[in-house]
Amino acid sequence: MNSRQFNQKTKVDPHFHRKCFWTNVSNVNISEEDDQIRDGGIVDSHVSNLASQIFMEGQKVPITVESDGNGGLKAVDGSHRIGAVKLNDEAHPEDGHDQIFVYEEKFSSEAERVLYQKDCNEHLVAKKNHINDAAASIRKLMEMKNDPNVPDILQRDVSTEPDPKCYMKDLEAWIKDNYSFTAREYKSILTKVTSDYTNSKVKNYTKSDLVGEFSINNTIGWVGSKAGDESNGYTLYPVNKASHIFPNVTGNSYKKKTKNKNTQSVVVLWESNTIGKEGCHIDDYRRKVVESINDANQSHLLKKGTKLVDKVFLAPQKIGSVKENLNSFYEVPYNSGRFSINLPRKGW
């Protein structure tokens, strides 16, 4: 529970605080899977800040708990406050800092709990939702299509939508109504929650999926596990936006090559925003990225014969009437100091 929720409940029921109670913090169990939707789990710095605040001012907002079915309590939200109380108890064991203020709630379904947790994380004293937290909770709700508590927009299947573009607009509008982020962050969340959707003509990847596929199917002997890994003399840079060439790829490649002049930089590119797009859009995107790479390689700041990007591969994405081999990454030819922009349009 956050301060906004607590104040709202108190306005509706002036005696709400009587429904809350103090209990020893050891009585509340935390489940990493169920207590909150967090991409990175508990953040130590936030726990430390809360510990100082609670030590000086006391805990003003209760955490939410529910029965664990065995006579105990488990946290629904407030894992950082639990950590803060434990930290204060360890630092001042003689001063009775082992008590935590709680409110016990009952949920009719997992979806109701996830939506509640989403609201808890939107305002302090909670640690605010990160874009990955938001994406995780939305994707979890999307998997609960038979739960009546799941909003209608999250029950729709984009892969069967007659107009995916309209669906994306509706989904983005719902995210904006339910989370507080910047315009760029909203777009990022939208990409994350739809990254594994495939329409009838174009396949998409998450970055980790792409790296995994490339590790298995590349022709240069690269066997790393994540972006930026160096293997067999090559460093991998997955690119899903033309804007990532400057400064992301160029900066990282420059740093790597400064430390090891023999390492070669490899770009694997794919279009991540595939909803409503066809093969021709993928072609345009690929050309745009390759042209950006050529611009980077031809910078007058570079020594003659030096490249920031040594190899470029296309990830297979066309799966409609034009089919690209999903077990093969196409290496873009390099001739006369430039990567070719005459890329295959009819598969490989």
Image: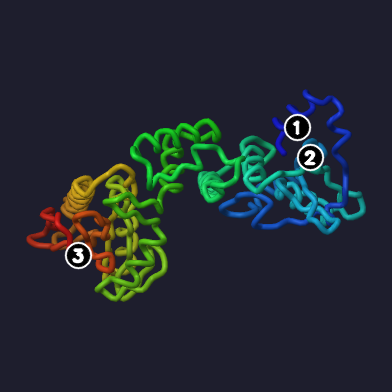
> Looking at the picture, how far across and down is residue 103, in whole percent?
81, 41
Crowding at label 1, few (<14), some or many (≥20) Cα neighbours within 10 Å?
Answer: some
Mark 1 vs 2, N-terminal side: 1
Q: Name the residue under label 1.
A: 6
Q: Name the residue under label 2.
A: 62
Q: In this view, does 206 lie above or below 190?
A: below
Mark 2 vs 3, N-terminal side: 2
Name the kind of residue labelled 1 in the image.
Answer: Phe
**Mark identifier at residue 331:** 3
Judging depth in this view, the residue of 104 and 153 nearest the camera is: 153
The reply to whether callout 1 and callout 3 are in contact (CB within 8 Å) is no
Asked if residue 296 shows in the view, the reply is no
What kind of colouring is applied to the model shown?
rainbow
Mark 1 vs 3, N-terminal side: 1
Cα–Cα gap, marks 1 and 3: 57 Å
Crowding at label 3, few (<14), some or many (≥20) Cα neighbours within 10 Å?
Answer: some
